[in-house]
Amino acid sequence: MPLLLGVNIDHIATLRQARYAKTPDSPNAEPCPVIAGQDALAGGADSLTIHVRADRRHMQDADAFRIRSEIKVPLNLEMGVTEEMVGIALKLKPEFVCLVPENRMEITTEGGLNVLASFDKTRMVIARLQDAGIRISVFIDPDLKQVEAAGEACADMIELHTGAFANATGDNVQVELDRLIAAAKEGHLSLQVNAGHGINYINIAQILTIPHLAELNIGHSIIARSTRVGLTAAVREMKDLMANYPG
């Protein structure tokens, strides 16, 4: 199976909100997340990832429902483990939900969900969403105990947080890569293994040494590259780099 690419288009909404936070529905509001999703699809995106946060700092509810309605590609909804977000997910009915931690002070997600510390709540949310036909991933650090807890919570998938690897320097790069490799090997025994956060056009070569990956979710680097070449071309370039993944 080829390695799939989920393109996170949250930063398109972030740019719009910088000017139109109070009037995101204005006909002048730009850029448009729906158009961005269409451009990503044209470049070969296998799915779209969006994160509706509690404070609605970028994606709005209306964005999520328009993307779901207008773009015929699998949708991955990142969300906090809250009753409000469960309600949105049950109405939106994306193909996938990825449960992530949320901190109102963070600029972007800064670490994995601690499944061990919130096991009962996480397990309950997973069950409710799976009952609606949604496949569930949990975004976790490459820690073997967290991988085990994700399996015990009956998640369908894990998404390994690659941020520590992406930010590492010197000898720590290999240390973090080894952690990801070990977690992928463990997770593959019972779960689909995805990865994301901080992956770019340079470190993708090392990411592709991680075994058993099914999908990468990449946002910031692709959106940044799109300011030079356009979003469709930026997605296509990343897909080309991923094409020879050995599995």
Image (cartoon, rainbow, N blue to C red):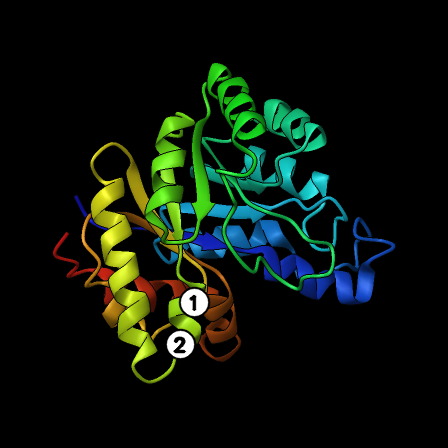
Q: Mark 2: few, some, or many residues within 10 Å (few <14, many ≥20)?
A: some
Q: Residue at x 24, y 64 (%)?
A: 178
**Residue 189: quadrant of the picture:** top left
Q: Is residue 126 above or below residue 28?
A: above
The quarter in which the N terminus is drawn is top left
Judged from the image, the secondary structure of the residue bearing numbered disc 1 is helix
Q: Amino acid at mark 1?
A: Ala
| Mark 2 vs 1: CB contact within 8 A | yes
Residue at screen point 70% across, 55% down: 58
Residue sitting farthest toward the bottom? 170
Residue 123 percent across, percent down from the top left: 50, 25
Furthest-left residue in this view = 246
Kind of residue at disc 2: Ala
Q: Nearer the viewer, residue 225 or 192?
A: 192
Report crowding for label 1: few under 14, some 14 to 19, many 20 or more residues within 10 A (C-alpha).
many
Left or right: residue 145 versus residue 125 is left
The image shows residue 135 at horizontal and vertical percentages of 42, 28
- The x, y position of residue 56, in whole percent, is 75, 48
